[in-house]
Amino acid sequence: MLDLKFIRNNPEKVKQAIELKNDYADVDKLLELDAKRRQILSEVEDLKHQRNTVSDEIARLKRQKQDATEIIQEMRTVSTKIKEMDEEVRQLEDQIQDILIRIPNVPHESVPIGKDETANVEVKRQGELPEMDFQPVPHWEIGEKLGILDLAGGSKLSGSFFINYVGLGARLQRALIAFMLDLHTQKHGYTEVYPPFVVNRESMFGTGQLPKMEVFSP
């Protein structure tokens, strides 16, 4: 997640990054909310300083047996105002956070610009591609014909680019997972951990699973 100060100092750069990623986030609204929050915070700090100063004055008047009723009533009004403004700041921070977590990172200058994966650039090719005397079939078509991949079912359950592995496909997937775990725990010093299947919101947010990003237009 981008730092709010960075966005504040580089709004156009952030807007361009969002556009290049074919995403949407209301940066102007974010900055508007941020400016309002900072203004209220400044006013609240002034009121709290006033309250602290007057509290000392009230204590002095009480020590001198003087009437401080009027000042006490004024400070009650000030305290109520502070509480209301603190709540307004909290609500603003919630709105800011809601926009902030949806702003993508700024892509590196070397990343090619494009609407989809067709703009990807081949950086390196290892080895030689075999020459075939027939038209090769994509692996996903082969998988569906063999009954080991269910693309439509996976998309229905979880969205685009998700697949159901069926029968031997599921078995192969499980074998590859076991192979990877065995390799790294036995030869590369890793410790296998099997965490709970269900996790809390903070864990999902920290690992980038929340919020769910969707490309849309305002």
Image (cartoon, helix red, strand yellow):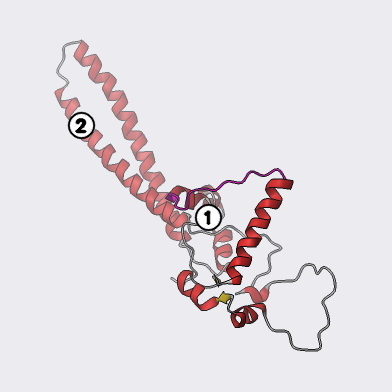
Which residue is found at the position 36% from the left and 35% from the top?
Answer: 45
Residue 208's disc number: 1
Which residue is found at the position 25% from the left and 39% from the top?
Answer: 81
| Residue 198: in magenta span | yes
What distance separates the C-alpha of mark 1 from that of mark 2? 45 Å
User: 203 or 91: which is nearer to us?
Assistant: 203
How many dots with numbers?
2
Which residue is found at the position 34% from the left and 49% from the top?
Answer: 91
Q: Judge left or right: residue 110 versus residue 11.
A: right
Q: Quadrant of residue 190?
A: top right
User: 38 or 105: which is nearer to us?
Assistant: 105
Of tags 1 and 2, the one toward the viewer is 1
State whether residue 109 is above or below residue 203. Answer: below
- Specify the amino acid type for callout 2: Arg
Please rate how many residues cluster around mark 2, counting C-alpha atoms within 10 Å: few if below 14, some from 14 to 19, many from 20: few
State whether residue 22 is above or below residue 83. Answer: below
- Residue 207: % across, % down: 53, 52
| Residue 55: in magenta span | no
- Residue 192: % across, % down: 61, 46
Which residue is found at the position 57% from the left and 55% from the top?
Answer: 10
Residue 76's disc number: 2
Residue 98's disc number: none
Quarter placement of the C terminus = bottom left
- Residue 124: % across, % down: 79, 67
Predominant secondary structure in magenta?
loop
Dot 1 or dot 2, earlier in sequence: 2
User: 214 or 192: which is nearer to us?
Assistant: 192
The magenta region covers 188-201
Q: Identify the secondary structure beneath mark 1.
A: loop
In the rendered image, the residue lying farthest to the top is 64
- Specify the amino acid type for callout 1: Gly
